[in-house]
Image: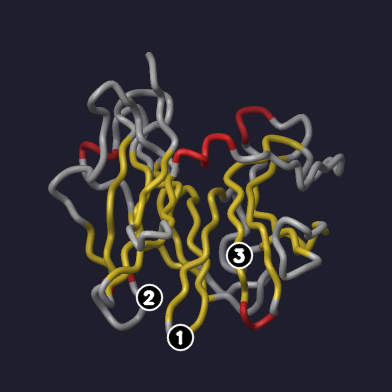
Amino acid sequence: MASLKTATPKVVWTDSTAARCCNLWAPEIHWIAGQSSWFIYYTAGVAGTANFDGQRLHVLKGSSNDIWASTWSYAGRIAIPNRDVWAIDATVLFLPAGPYLVFSSWDGDEQCLWISKMNSATSVGNAVKISRPSNSWEQIGGKTNEGAAALYHGGRTWIIYSASSCAGTGYALGSIELTGSDPLSASSWTKYNNGPIFKSAFGNYAPGHNGFFTAPSGNIYNVSVMFEHL
């Protein structure tokens, strides 16, 4: 575990295309079995756009089954058929029915979580809203649900997400669980409403965009963005 902080970094992509050159963030690497390739899902914006207003979802494709050895090529922008608008923080949710794309996008003055069935690594169906910032702890500095990550354990499936504005100590992690049979139905998702599952504490502030990995020991760990000092 200690060696993680000394891992060798590697730049895998830069882009000068005006439609996707700027404000790159939230990269995630996923193996899409139906296409037998690694793909990187990330957010990028348009040159000269103020306040991140041009952010959209983009995809890179790897050249090899070996992630480290791969070179990466631009595979396309994900256009949501029923709402091709501002969207960020894509992740892939793997279920028996196939892969689903989960991302964050606005609905009025609320930044919500949406889900779409994936037709391919770069094509999805219509999006359905599955979580909105309905609790006071999700509305500190801004009504926000973003930065989703899937967690699978004991036959159950959760999405752990960031809530409230990333600009302050109210940023925290919330949870929804797939409790119904249809991931594309909002009623199939149950939110844990009793408060965030991670929040500022013990000198670590604003846990945000997160993910999970399994160590060689078999233990599952959560990793998230935090401020060490304010």
Q: Residues within 10 Å of mark 3 (few under 14, many from 20)?
A: some
Rendering quarter of residue 77: bottom right
Marking on residue 80: 3
Residue that sits furthest to the right in the current view: 16
Image quarter hosting the C terminus? top left
Check the image and report above or below for 17 versus 6: below
Task: Choose the circle earlier in sequence order: 1 or 3.
Answer: 3
Q: Nearer the viewer, residue 5 or 21?
A: 5
Q: Amino acid at mark 2?
A: Pro
Are the two marked residues, 2 and 1, in contact with CB atoms closer than 8 angstroms? Answer: yes
* Image position, residue 174 (x, y; %): 28, 48
Q: Residues within 10 Å of mark 1 (few under 14, many from 20)?
A: few
Q: CA distance from mark 2 to mark 1?
A: 9 Å
Query: Circle 2 sits on which residue?
Result: 183
Residue that sits furthest to the top in the current view: 230
* Image position, residue 52 (x, y; %): 62, 34
Q: Nearer the viewer, residue 56 or 37?
A: 37
Please give left or right for residue 105 compared with residue 130 in the image. Answer: right
| Disc 2, SS | loop
